[in-house]
Amino acid sequence: MVSAKMEEALNAQVNKEMYSAYLYMSMSAFAESMGYKGIATWFMVQYHEEMVHAMKIYEYIIRVGKKVVLNTIEQPPSQFDSVQDMFRNALKHEQYITESINNLVDLAISEKDHATKIFLDWYVTEQVEEEESVNDILQKLDLIGENGNALYMLNKEIGARTVNVALDYSRGVENGSQGGA
Ligand code: OFO
């Protein structure tokens, strides 16, 4: 049994994941405007991942017989000082999301809601990955410093990232296709 309090908290998390998608789409647009096509691709792949994060919770709320209530998505920043600044913001955001997931887990435990706790475990693991991948790029950016050639190479390297989550989740994320079909 999922409580009304948990239902509300899960709906709030849908909104946060949608904001994540929006934020990374905005970062992708900023990277495009700076001519960093590879970085733009990396953030657009991240956008797709966030949409799936939101959809998994959306579907869970429905599966447990509760109601999805969508809220306004906050406007993300559209201007950053540099590529480094953008990734620093991305890391800060992921740390915020990790905290939010941890709070949800705490709530599930305090309510003895084992099903939701198990459902959220996937997000706990995913957040380790989310922070790690951004941290990884930030470390490289620190090494690169002001070196334009090296930044160009990093742009190329991370631009090779591809989408490996469902792009069409009309029949559910688990049954989703990765697009093209
Ligand atoms: Fe949904 O993990 Fe990033 O924000």
Image: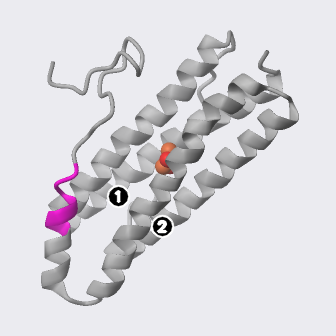
Query: Which label belongs to residue 89?
Result: 2
- Name the spot of residue 141 as percent of width and height, x first: 32, 79
Residue 10 as seen in the image, left or right of residue 3 = left
Residue 171 as seen in the image, left or right of residue 94 = left
Tell me if label 2 and label 1 are in contact, CB under 8 Å.
yes
| SS for callout 1 | helix
Position above or below: 169 against 82 = above
Instruction: Identify the residue at image location x=70%, y=48%.
Output: 102
Alpha carbons under labels 2 and 1: distance apart:
10 Å
| SS for callout 2 | helix
Q: Residue furthest bottom?
A: 146
Q: Nearer the viewer, residue 14 or 111?
A: 111
| Mark 1 nearby-residue class (10 Å; few <14, some 14–19, many ≥20) | many
Which segment did they paint magenta? Answer: 155-161
Residue 65 as seen in the image, left or right of residue 178 = right
Position above or below: 61 against 121 = above
